Amino acid sequence: MDALNPYHLRPWVGQYGSHISAELPTPAHPSLAAMASAACTRFAAQTAFTTVMPNGMYGSLSYGQVQEKSDHFARYLRQVLGLAAGDRVAIQMPNCLSYPVVLLGVLKAGCVAVNTNPLYTASEMAHQFKDSGAKVVVVVDMFADKLEQALPGTDVKHVVITRVPEFFPALVGGIVHAVMKYWNELVPRHGVQATALPAALTQGAAAGGEVASYSQGLKHDSLALLQYTGGTTGVAKGAMLTHGNLLWNMAQMRAMCASHIDEGQEVVLTALPLYHIFAFTVNFLCMFEAGARNILVPSPRPIQNLQRAIENYKITWITGVNTLYNALLGEEWFTAFPPKHLKAAGGGGAAMHHAVVERFEQVTGAPLVEGYGLTESSPVVCFQPLNAQRQKDTIGVPAPMTDVGLVDDHGQPVAVGQPGELVVRGPQVMQGYWQRPEASAEVLKDGWLYTGDVAVMDAHGTFKIVDRKKDMILVSGFNVYPNEIEDALSRHDGVLEAAVIGVPDDKTGEAVRAYVVKRDESLTAEALQAHCRTLLTGYKLPARIEFRDELPKTPVGKILRRDLRAEVLAAHKKTKG
């Protein structure tokens, strides 16, 4: 193995134990379409997806129904609209029954899916549609007015509109939609020329055609998904994820969690949006192949929206981000009556805080295991093993068939225990960014993906993320990492959420500033500073603590430090000017 990987002996394999296979066979299916069809046939009579509304009303689809409806949609795309293999189809909807039908229909058609955040502004939508060259957009009716503004200048020729309660029983679906449209006023008027999804499926069914032939030519190196990322550092770029990338990552994740996944038996709560790569691969693809029942929540905000889903179903798995688990722990209905059947919960997307993990495990009796990944790696790179080797407050160990290295600013390997940029090599790493060779070359070097995250590895092969390289704060020449300070702040019982950034300082170059949302209104900055002094050395202490009612977040719930930083820099520039 090359010099970039001094850990070529893969010391982490020793932590796999008897539950995790170090070597995995090549995924048997040539494509996600073939995988999905096989799962639908195997588990045809079982419930695949259930969408649960905040009031408990729900609708479900069996694996057999998902097979039939996704076949109809594949025929609609190929036979009715005349799309060709490789054409891009944008999917823009929250968690609902339409999502798996449309997504699998796109893949079965041999087309490429373009996950699109439904909360995007019209300009953000327009950029993604233009950049991807999408010819079809499938959008939920709640956001069709923004779509109308975004379409001019794009290659989009056809629009399909769906509803959140699509495929619900007629009476229930009618009530839910009426409440959304007339009571909550969530369905705006629009002038988009579109086909309703049920009508598209009817047309597809009538068109006929052998669905299997559409995806017959797909192989592991065929493009499956354009997953946009990088909007926080510039123009959003489409990570090119192949069928092989995603099938391998499914196999890697299934291997890591094999001891806690029983085929055909799991019930997974999906509160994170399926258009996000974490929920897409882990909740949707992995659990679909395993024959699980997926409980879909259209929106986890406010957190009470999860109550009926958790109370009414025998949830065995939950995935989420730190803010979601933290919010659940603030709800009496959750802490008094936690899910009784929970086997495990997975955390990712941002650093999990020690206090949140500890309390969640005390309340539920189930492990909350942290992982690490990024869009460009489909996403899973590391995960805490669900065995006695598990080390909390880490991202665990690399998934099977994954090489991880740590390098300095010159690209040279760092010693064990020293921080360095985390680089990844494995079958789950993307092909590159769509039509952006320069941007691809910046992160893909000699077969390695440069993540921009700083981590350390111990002698046993366990990794811990220190922070994003770009978020590091330089205080009088000392490196300070916001994650460490945020974790220290969150250990105070009076803190609900915290974010830390570096701000310009005439004396130290940069100073640490903390933004805190209180859990206890009596909390003072002085008390919090005293708490931090017991956990942090002097130069890491926040020079200023500012209390806020809320912190800026992405739709997934990750706290946006960049927004706080932009606010400070704008004020600093104004003062200096």
Image (tube, rainbow, N blue to C red):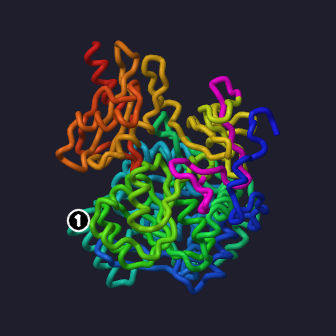
Q: Main secondary structure of the magenta part?
A: loop
Look at 36% across and 20% down and name the residue there: 504
Q: Is residue 159 left or right of residue 105?
A: left
Q: Is residue 233 left or right of residue 108?
A: left
**Viewport quadrant of the N terminus:** top right
- Asked whether residue 104 appears in the rendered view, the answer is yes
Residue at numbered disc 1: 184
Residue 99 location (% of width, % of height): 49, 66
Look at 54% across and 75% down and name the residue there: 266
Within 10 Å of disc 1 (Cα), the crowding (few <14, some 14-19, many 20+) is few
Name the residue furthest left.
522
> Which residue is more in the foreground, 290 or 7?
7
Residue 372 location (% of width, % of height): 56, 49
Name the residue furthest right.
1
Q: Quadrant of residue 459?
A: top right
> Which residue is more in the foreground, 362 or 542?
362
Residue 366 location (% of width, % of height): 48, 67
In this rendering, the answer to whether 439 lies above or below 479 is: below
Residue 359 location (% of width, % of height): 39, 58
Magenta stretch contains residue 410 = yes
- Asked whether residue 199 appears in the rendered view, the answer is no
In this rendering, the answer to whether 470 lies above or below 390 is: above
User: Circle 1 sits in a helix, a strand or a loop, which is it?
Assistant: loop
Look at 32% across and 67% down and name the residue there: 335
Q: Quadrant of residue 546?
A: top left
Q: Is residue 233 left or right of residue 436?
A: left
Name the residue furthest front.
534
Magenta stretch contains residue 518 = no
- Specify start and end residues of the magenta stretch as a single range: 383-412
**Viewport quadrant of the C terminus:** top left
